[in-house]
Amino acid sequence: MQVYTTDTPAARSGRIKVGIADYAISGDESTLTTSGLGSCIGVALYDPETRVSGLAHAMLPEADGGGEPAKFVDTGIELLLSEMRAAGADIDRVVAKIAGGSTMFDFTSADGDGSIGDRNVAATRATLDGFGIDVVAEDVGGSHGRSLELDSETGDLRVRSAKSGNHVL
Amino acid sequence: MNLDVRSLRTFSRLAHSGAEKAAGSLTTLAGIDTYVNVTKVELGTKSDVENEFAERDLVSVHIGFSGGLDGHTVLAFSPESAERLVDALMPGIDATDAEGELAESSLKEVANIMLGGFIDGWADYLDTTVDITTPTYVDDENDGPLDHVDAEGFENGGDDEHVLVFRNQLEAADNAIEFDLYMVPTASSIETIVEASGEDGALPVESFAAFSEMINDGANQASEDITAMTGIDTTVEVSRLSFVPIEGVPMSLTDAVRRGVVLEFSGTPSGYIAILFDEPSAENIASSLLPGMEGDEAMRQSAIQEIGNITTSGFLDGWANALETTIDISPPKHVHDIGSAIIDPLATDLAQSQEYAFLIDSTIRTDDDEFTCDIYALPDETELRKALKQLSPVA
């Protein structure tokens, strides 16, 4: 987890764990993983030519000035992209796969502007659109949790869920 | 002594960055990618901490520190994790045989490097120097893990006195090695850090201790109610109050599938509660409520909802009494999903208005492991502080 720093330990074991309000990139054959997405959203980005990939796990749609940037969809994606660019990715080639953003409970606080899950999905589309990045596959919404594995070699995003089993995006 | 949210945040940040240094040194030393999973500032009693060590058969290495800060740090492993770590450090050494001494000394070496890095971060923050003692290896056949902490605890007291414990859960990337890094500073050292971070709306530590006792009472009541309902004896294994970065709340759970209920409570404080069982536990508890019946899924769900309801009211009623308020509870919503994903929306909802959370977690279990029930409560931070004020001795 990188709550207070953005140093990613050098990957040796081939698996890089992305915490909540966290992101990581990979320029080799590592697998990026993140678990326990409920209303949170997972954003997997992949440059098919350089095979630089990145995975972010954001909690809330928009940064309001405070807190870790990786906690929010807009600032999290921005950070992830800038690290991918530094690692050799070309933003014009980068494609996105997104998963998460479910509405598991009807909380009283969700009155009005929709559930946090829905707002996370909308913010993700808007932010990616702003960078001209296409969403090529998605598994969003619903009322169940998800865990993700991004294969940096192929760009495959494996989605695991307790209810609908495993599938690959 | 007073504690406030700002100093709790300082503690949390220091502990987290210290733990990252410690994880980084292990990555360098052993070539094992190590991550800090969650950093918690916990308020519990000395006996709570000792029970946890005993329950999990932890193997640990202790290092004392003194100078600008005084206290104790402990690196604790499950025996399996210790074995895997030794194997990674010294391939071919069997940790369980006569060469155990070698394993012991390599764990001590790891602890020395990791805990040293951890303490350095605190010393830097306080602009002071801290000396560390040589490591002591402790396994479950030796003394209690906190024996050395005697008279160095929070209130300098006996087993029921509260201690402030910094607990960092670390794990290797492949989940094969997990360990906890504990730090227990002395009361005067806590004061030193509180002073350095500046007090702001501080509450006497007694309020936190009173609240922590209230949580214990609530857990005991819930345990009694579960026993009355199922006819199976249960005990409270652990019950604690911790202060964690909000994103650390779901990360306290694994992605194992859990079944249970989620409820919303409102009053002073309001918040969320989740009562979760692992799948075998849920199965056992449902059968004990539906004796001799081949219950269908709908019946099992309603049995789980019923037990969730009873547990929640047992857990929260005492709070309402102690705080002289009413706490309303929503109908229970049945959940059956990835554990961390169940808690994620609860933490995320609170994350809209707070960066840190008070997490209350209790575990109730039967003696024969027939079932284990985990209770997670997440009160709204501002409202909880209001409630804590009422518990202040001078209020």
Image (cartoon, coloured by chain):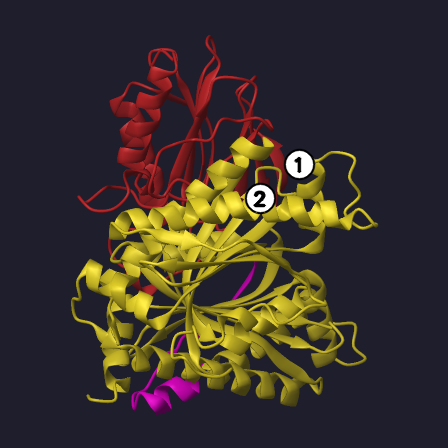
Q: Can residue A37 be seen in this view?
A: no
Q: Chain B is drawn in which colour?
A: yellow
Identify the residue position indicated by label 2 in the image.
B110
Q: In this view, does B202 lie above or below B129?
A: below
Percent position (x, y) of residue B184? 44, 65
Image quadrant occupied by the C terminus of chain B:
bottom left
Q: Is residue B271 above or below residue B320?
A: above
Residue at 28% from the left image edge and 56% from the top image edge: B10
Image quarter for residue B77?
bottom right
Can you identify the residue that label 1 sits on? B89
- Mark number, residue B256: none
Disc 2 element: helix
* Residue A148 shows up from this direction: yes
Q: The red chain is which one?
A: A
Residue at horizontal 59 percent and vertical 88 percent from the top: B224
Numbered range of the magenta stretch: B316-336
Q: Is residue B5 found left or right of B65 in the rendered image?
A: left
**B353 or B145: nearer the eye?**
B145
Type of amino acid at the residue the image marks with label 2: Val
* Horizontal side, residue B337 vs residue B202: left or right: right
In the image: residue B249, left or right of residue B105:
left
